[in-house]
Amino acid sequence: MNHHNHRSREELDRRRIDRALAGLEDAVRRCRDEDVRHGTGISAALSFLELRADEKWPFEQFPAGA
């Protein structure tokens, strides 16, 4: 893989991570007024971030399908 493709892949991964975090931040803002626990976007964001995280323990409090 050449340097340009590697950089583009890293940038794409960073944008995906940023979108996942933004979705979780939005859920945190909304959680006082609505139940956001079962939104597919939230589950997808958590799963996506868990796959990329070095530490897995923060995700253990959010079991899949809960």
Image: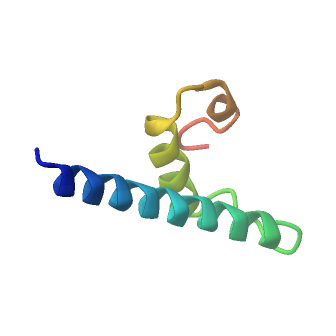
Indicate the position of residue 24 as horizontal and vertical percent values.
Answer: 65, 61
How was this image coloured?
rainbow
Judging depth in this view, the residue of 31 and 3 nearest the camera is: 3
Q: Is residue 27 above or below residue 63?
A: below
* Left or right position of 16 against 22: left
Taking the spot 59% from the left edge, 25% from the top edge, the residue there is: 55
Q: Residue furthest right?
A: 32
Judging depth in this view, the residue of 29 and 34 nearest the camera is: 29
Indicate the position of residue 10 as horizontal and vertical percent values.
Answer: 34, 52
Taking the spot 68% from the left edge, 32% from the top edge, the residue there is: 58
Is the C terminus in the top left, top right, bottom left or bottom right quadrant? top right
Judging depth in this view, the residue of 6 and 48 nearest the camera is: 6
**The image quarter in which residue 14 lies:** bottom left
Indicate the position of residue 8 as horizontal and vertical percent values.
Answer: 27, 60
Indicate the position of residue 20 as horizontal and vertical percent values.
Answer: 53, 60
Is the N terminus in the top left, top right, bottom left or bottom right quadrant? top left
Judging depth in this view, the residue of 2 and 18 nearest the camera is: 2
Taking the spot 28% from the left edge, 54% from the top edge, the residue there is: 7
Q: Is residue 8 above or below residue 66?
A: below
Q: Is residue 41 above or below residue 64?
A: below
